[in-house]
Image (tube, grey):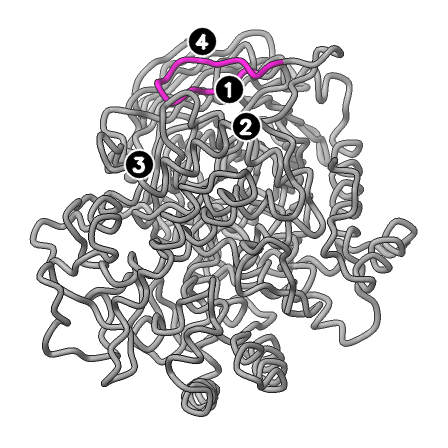
């Protein structure tokens, strides 16, 4: 089935795909990971990785500061000039296992940005740094050490080239907080005969919020190519010479060497979310006899192959850089969580086993994933066009969690529920996949999961999101209720975001309706169709805006269409009034074609004066009070709506302007990554828009058509 060309492919794409198989250009030269890396999420900057891999290696400049809110910018920031180490895990709500080289007096704490000499961190110059898809290197000025990183799917490769010294150090900093991982609960590190292994257990903020009591575990098994002359363990800044095992928060191991000038110490580390034994197995199966250079070449070849599924030629070099950097980010996130033998972390903390085929290989993989909120306007469309094999695999991964825990997840970290915004569009993504012929999974299980996600509220787990879906099903809308407790996503009788939830649930109900119809579930189809009209309950004919309603059915008073957070999540009425993606033509009819076009065109005219927000504000919530915010999910289809109001030329005009002006090629003005890039979403939007393939309805119709 997956070998078939999806039937909505256009001839343009088929031809580019055919050419890409023969392309000779090194596409990695167009990938610039530092673009947009000012004020970015922890998982954003991971150059030393392969597509959808578990091993995602990168330098950290402020990852040890932690992430109190769960979504803050942390990890690597292009403005910083010192590096505190190199982390092996970079994923949504997952991070840790840091290695760091040094020379001289041993320091076992990373140190502070404003006091870099207080720890093992080192200054570096930007001119001495290089990053592309699959490889990273930097000269650590304080130690005259050249650090290099690359990876296979589950194995991280480190190469540290030292000067001549008798005081070369390797620090394995395992028991400290890193990135989005949250507080460390426990850790253990061991050393014996050129091997270091152990684990760290963390409690990410979103896991605490949506699945209390659950934790995220990361395991590693590292192989070093040189025998140290001495070794020891540490807890924070206290060292224990010649000790080989340590347990608890702040735990780590250090190794000391003598090196000649230009001598390299290589580390290969197998990673796993299930056990040290499986981390070692991953290392043996993927990289037993593989050198650093072989791994690097393999990573670059893999990226060329995957990037080459879409080949663009000609045009400006800057635009090709935007294109392939965007595609790189789209393929980077939502990485492997299962091992080579099919072992995977279950939601309850135990280890599960994916079924094996006749060759002894897992029939699919398991993945970590940020929420799919908005990803149906970028990632899933891109997957369906060029990476249907991954899309199918991703769905099977989601169904694995449903089978184990009873609900589809919104976001998944180590199989733990980590809903990002308290909604859940996983069912829509499954229904859309069916429409484009991606169906290699248990269809009955998939439909049951989608149906439950859209309709059921009883005993609904917080991490499944949509806790107010029950009132939506009863009333046809989710009432606006003021949040007085600081947990708006956990309310059941309405929501502070009741209006945006209503629009979102109506959209996903429309997707479920088509899924039900295709499978002959007529009774469900009728119910879903009814719910898909919920958006009409919020349309105010006087103001011609979507307007929140209270629990009595009245529109809220003191309504301000610019005001965010009051009825609308991460946006306002100006932005969300256009949120009827399943039937945009009906919204046009209701507003009136002329007024619709005039209002929409004026929004872009005004927004362009501020570069559509690109590069003008470094803030995770930049633009939520504006007319239009292309850096955040609810706004992603708006520029394409003119196709439904008789003015496709205006969509072409404004989409091109957004691509040219909002998306940039420097560390600050690049993709609006300081906002909601969210594991490749904005990068994928740029890719789709650049090649002119986009579906406002997100593949949810019976025969999807791309605008």
Residue occupied by mark 2:
366
State the separation of the CA atoms marked 3 and 2.
18 Å
Q: Which residue is mark 4?
A: 244
Magenta stretch: residue 349 in it?
yes
Q: Callout 3: helix, strand or loop?
A: helix
Where's residue 116, x and y in %? Answer: 39, 48
- Taking 116 as reference, is 53 left or right? right
As drawn, 312 above or below 192: below
Say which of 364 and 615 sits in front.
Answer: 364
First along the sequence among labels 2 and 1: 1
Q: Looking at this view, is 142 or 45 the one in front?
A: 45
Verify CB contact (< 8 Å) between mark 2 and mark 1.
yes
Considering depth in this image, is 257 or 108 the residue closer to the camera?
Answer: 108
Residue numbers of the magenta segment: 343-355
Q: Which mark is residue 463?
A: 3
Query: Where is mark 1, residue-wise?
Result: 344
């Amino acid at each position: 089935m997956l070998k078939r060309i999806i039937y909505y492919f256009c001839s343009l794409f088929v031809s580019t795909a055919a050419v890409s198989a023969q392309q000779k250009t090194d596409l990695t030269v167009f990938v610039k990971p530092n673009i947009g890396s000012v004020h970015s999420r922890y998982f954003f900057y991971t150059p030393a990785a392969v597509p959808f891999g578990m091993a995602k290696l990168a330098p950290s400049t402020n990852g040890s500061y932690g992430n109190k809110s769960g979504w803050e910018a942390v990890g690597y920031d292009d403005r910083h000039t010192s590096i505190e180490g190199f982390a092996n895990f970079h994923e949504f709500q997952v991070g840790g296992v840091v290695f760091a080289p040094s020379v001289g007096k041993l320091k076992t704490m990373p140190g502070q940005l404003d006091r870099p000499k207080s720890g093992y961190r080192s200054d570096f110059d930007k001119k001495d740094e290089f990053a592309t898809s699959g490889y990273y290197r930097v000269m650590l000025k304080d130690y005259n050490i050249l650090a290099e990183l690359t990876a296979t799917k589950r194995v991280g490769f480190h190469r540290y080239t030292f000067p001549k010294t008798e005081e070369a150090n390797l620090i394995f900093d395992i028991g400290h907080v890193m990135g989005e991982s949250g507080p460390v609960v426990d850790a253990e590190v061991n050393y014996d005969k050129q091997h270091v292994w152990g684990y760290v257990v963390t409690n990410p903020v979103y896991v605490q919020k949506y699945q209390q009591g659950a934790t995220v575990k990361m395991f590693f098994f590292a192989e070093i190519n040189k025998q140290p002359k001495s070794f020891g363990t540490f807890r924070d800044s206290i060292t224990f010479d010649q000790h080989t095992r340590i347990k608890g928060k702040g735990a780590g191991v250090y190794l000391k060497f003598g090196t000649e000038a230009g001598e390299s110490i290589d580390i290969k580390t197998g990673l796993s979310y299930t056990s040290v034994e499986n981390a070692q197995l991953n290392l043996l199966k993927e990289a037993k006899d593989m050198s650093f250079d072989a791994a690097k070449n393999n990573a670059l070849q893999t990226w060329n192959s995957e990037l080459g599924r879409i080949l663009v030629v000609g045009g400006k070099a800057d635009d090709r850089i935007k294109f392939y950097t965007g595609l790189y980010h789209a393929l980077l996130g939502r990485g492997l969580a299962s091992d080579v033998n099919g072992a995977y972390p279950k939601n309850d903390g135990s280890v599960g086993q994916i079924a094996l085929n006749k060759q002894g290989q897992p029939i699919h993989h398991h993945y970590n994933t940020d929420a799919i909120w908005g990803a149906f306007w970028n990632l899933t469309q891109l997957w369906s066009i060029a990476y249907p094999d991954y899309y199918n695999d991703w769905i099977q991964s989601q169904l694995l969690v449903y089978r184990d825990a009873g609900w589809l997840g919104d976001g998944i970290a180590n199989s733990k529920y980590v809903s990002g915004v308290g909604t859940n569009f996983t069912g829509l993504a499954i229904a859309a996949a069916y429409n484009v012929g991606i169906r290699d999974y248990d269809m009955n299980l998939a439909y049951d999961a989608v149906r439950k996600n859209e309709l059921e509220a009883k005993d609904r787990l917080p991490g499944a999101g949509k806790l107010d879906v029950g009132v939506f099903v009863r009333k046809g809308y989710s009432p606006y209720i003021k949040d007085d407790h600081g947990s708006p996503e956990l309310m059941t009788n309405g929501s502070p975001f009741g209006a945006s939830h209503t629009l979102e649930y109506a959209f996903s109900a429309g997707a479920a309706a088509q899924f039900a119809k295709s499978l002959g579930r007529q009774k469900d189809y009728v119910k879903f169709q009814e719910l898909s009209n919920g958006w009409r309950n919020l349309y105010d004919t006087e103001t011609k805006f979507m307007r929140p309603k209270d629990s009595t059915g009245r529109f809220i008073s003191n309504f301000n269409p610019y005001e965010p957070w009051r009825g609308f999540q991460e946006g306002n009425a100006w932005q969300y009034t256009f949120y009827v993606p399943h039937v945009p033509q009906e919204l046009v009819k209701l507003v009136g074609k002329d007024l619709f076009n005039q209002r929409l065109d004026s929004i872009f005219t005004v927004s362009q004066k501020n570069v559509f927000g690109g590069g003008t504000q470094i803030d995770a919530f930049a633009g939520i009070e504006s007319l239009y915010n292309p850096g955040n999910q609810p706004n992603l289809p708006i520029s394409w709506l003119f196709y439904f109001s008789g003015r496709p030329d205006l969509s072409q005009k404004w989409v091109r302007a957004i691509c040219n002006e909002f998306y940039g090629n420097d560390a600050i003005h690049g993709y609006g990554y300081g906002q909601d890039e969210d594991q490749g979403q904005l990068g994928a939007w740029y890719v789709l828009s650049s090649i002119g393939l986009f579906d406002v309805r997100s593949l949810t119709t019976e025969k999807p058509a791309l605008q």
